[in-house]
Image (cartoon, rainbow, N blue to C red):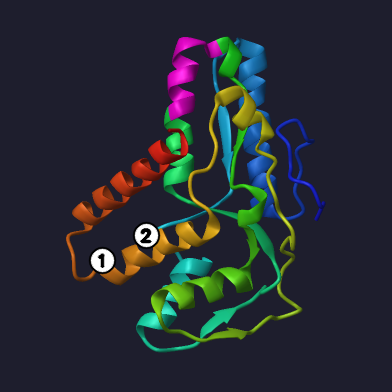
Amino acid sequence: EQLWGYREGDAMGGFDPYSSSKGAAEIAIASWRRSYKMPIASVRAGNVIGGGDWALDRIIPDCIRAIEVDKPIEIRNPLAIRPWQHVLEPLGAYLLLAVKLNYDPEKYAESWNIGPELDAVSTVKDISMLVTKQYGKGKVIDVSDFNQPHEAKLLMLDITKVKLLLGWSPVLNIEQAIEFTVEWYKKYSKENIYDLCIEQILKFNKYYEEMHS
């Protein structure tokens, strides 16, 4: 619940099993790195969104399923804040890190945060409303249950390290990330999915080139 983003060197922990399992993975990876001098990097991505995700109890798939059958979008933690990012953001960072790790394993065999800029950090309610706006329909209702298991209200990542040492930075703002995501779900049943994915990758690359030109 801290007001600043988590950094790579912060102590590992976790209130709930989901968070604790991530901390355990980081500790295990670090132990192999230290004990056996293995050039392993670990990467922590923010909350990833994008077309093709149909998992249960995830905000975007839940929104789309509700919209497609003309039902209200039910959200449990409307004020929960997360570092949302489109799936192409961390994928690009993973590839960049893999290349750098290959050429200089000692320098890049560390933990890295991959997340959005602070202006993309939004509440569950804001994300749901952006989805309905981009889709052109949908209604959001709050069905919060105060007796549900603990879930952090505020989660942010500090991406200073990856920007300075890896030379990576996010390409899409939150509106663009939602636009990419909703576009996929609006077209997947009418168009060739492979071609649609390639089209979005090329569009993403164009934004990347414009940002670095």
| Residue 42 drawn at (x, y percent) | 57, 30
29 vs 60, nearest the viewer: 60
In terms of image quadrants, where is residue 102?
top left
Query: Is the residue 192 above or below the residue 166 in the image?
Result: below
Please say whether residue 103 is one of the residues in the magenta stretch. yes
Residue 64 place in picture, x, y as percent: 41, 74
What residue is disc 2 on? 51
Say which residue label 1 marks.
188
**Considering the numbered disc 1 on the image, is that residue within a helix, a strand or a loop?**
loop
Residue at (61% x, 71% y) in the render: 126
Q: Is residue 67 left or right of residue 26?
A: left
Give amino acid for label 1: Tyr
- For label 2, count other residues whose C-alpha is less than 10 Å away and answer few (under 14), some (14-19) or many (20+): many
Magenta segment boundaries in residue numbering: 96-105
Residue at 56% x, 82% y is 74
Residue 30 picture location, percent across and down: 66, 24
